[in-house]
Image (spheres, rainbow, N blue to C red):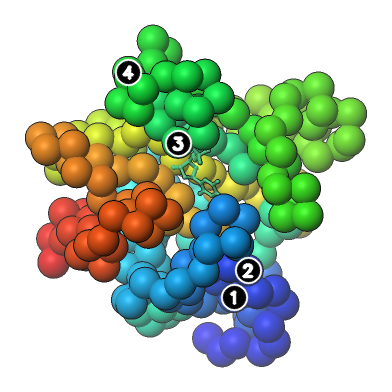
Amino acid sequence: MKKIEQLYEGKAKRVYSSDVDGVYIVSYKDDATAFNGLKKGTISGKGVINNRVTNHLMKMLEKKGIPTHFVQELNERETAVKKVTIIPLEVIVRNIAAGSLSKRLGLAEGTKLGSTVLEYCYKNDDLGDPMVNQYHIAAIDLATAQELEIISDYSFRINEILSEYLKDLKIELVDFKLEFGRTDDGEIILADEISPDTCRFWDSETGEKLDKDRFRRDLGGVEDAYLEILKRLLGE
Ligand code: TMP
């Protein structure tokens, strides 16, 4: 499979058309940003790790009945994925208070939530990805009510599957962000990535942060944290 033309460059990935109909190629970068691009840096080896971690988790989710865009890993940084139109929503799932939820609700980081929290943000860099609810989503036509029901059902199910899987690896799934896409046939499938860039992973025993918060908050040991996640998930 060959890349034909760059279609899009995001903060962490590039997307290309390919010589196969209905298939795109994503290429993961080492570039890291935070706070809507205000903080910029590089995490050496991040692209390779996020590519491999994402594919590992997407394959696992497929086996458990979640449709994803994953087609085939092409090399250490690049993966063939199904062509979709991304629904412009960041779907955030939370099990434990951290980050923006802790700030907004005045909850200490690490407070266990009584039940799973689902949030939607409108993917729009100019607006800083504002939080929206199902009424905003319907009113400005980001997704239909039926699509949103599928998205929320998948998101809760993904949370159960991932939380259980990571628990055995001594990783606590604090929160994470998902994106979904629409195929040409109108099917909703999981897209984008699931990686230390888009999840909060805490070591279950020590509470150590093994994710992008190490970069966001200048905690040091960023590369080692990403490598630790790769090691625990893929055994290398
Ligand atoms: P938050 O606490 O900053 O709202 O982040 C919640 C989760 O979403 C966390 O696991 C990090 C992830 N996330 C992204 O993947 N992309 C983003 O742009 C932001 C702000 C958060």
Q: Mark 2 points at which residue?
A: 10
> If you read the primary sequence from the N terminus, does the residue marked by circle 3 or circle 2 appear first?
2
Residue named by callout 1: 14
Q: Do the residues labelled 2 and 1 touch (CB within 8 Å)?
A: yes
Label 2 to label 4: alpha-carbon separation? 33 Å
Of circles 4 and 1, which is in front?
4
Q: In this view, does 175 lie to the left or right of 143?
A: left
Q: Position of residue 166 (x, y in %)?
A: 23, 40
Q: How far apart are marks 4 and 3 (CA)?
A: 13 Å
Q: Which of marks 1 and 3 is nearer the N terminus?
A: 1
Judging by the rendered image, the residue that carries numbered circle 4 is 112
Q: Which amino acid does label 4 sit on?
A: Lys
Tell whether circle 3 marks a residue whose Cβ is less than 8 angstroms from ligand 1: yes
**From the viewer's perspective, is residue 14 above or below residue 134?**
below
Q: What element carries label 3?
A: helix
Mark 1 → mark 3, Cα distance in angstroms: 27 Å
**Residue 8 found in image quarter:** bottom right
Q: Is residue 21 above or below residue 195?
A: below
Label 1 beta carbon less than 8 Å to ligand 1: no
Q: What element carries label 1?
A: strand
Residue 81 in sight from this viewpoint: no
Q: Disc 2 marks which amino acid?
A: Gly
| Residue 91 percent coordinates (x, y) | 58, 37
Q: Is residue 233 visible?
A: yes
- SS of the residue at dot 4? strand
**Residue bearing the label numbered 3:** 99
The answer for how far apart the CA atoms under marks 3 and 2 are is 23 Å
Of labels 2 and 4, earlier in sequence is 2
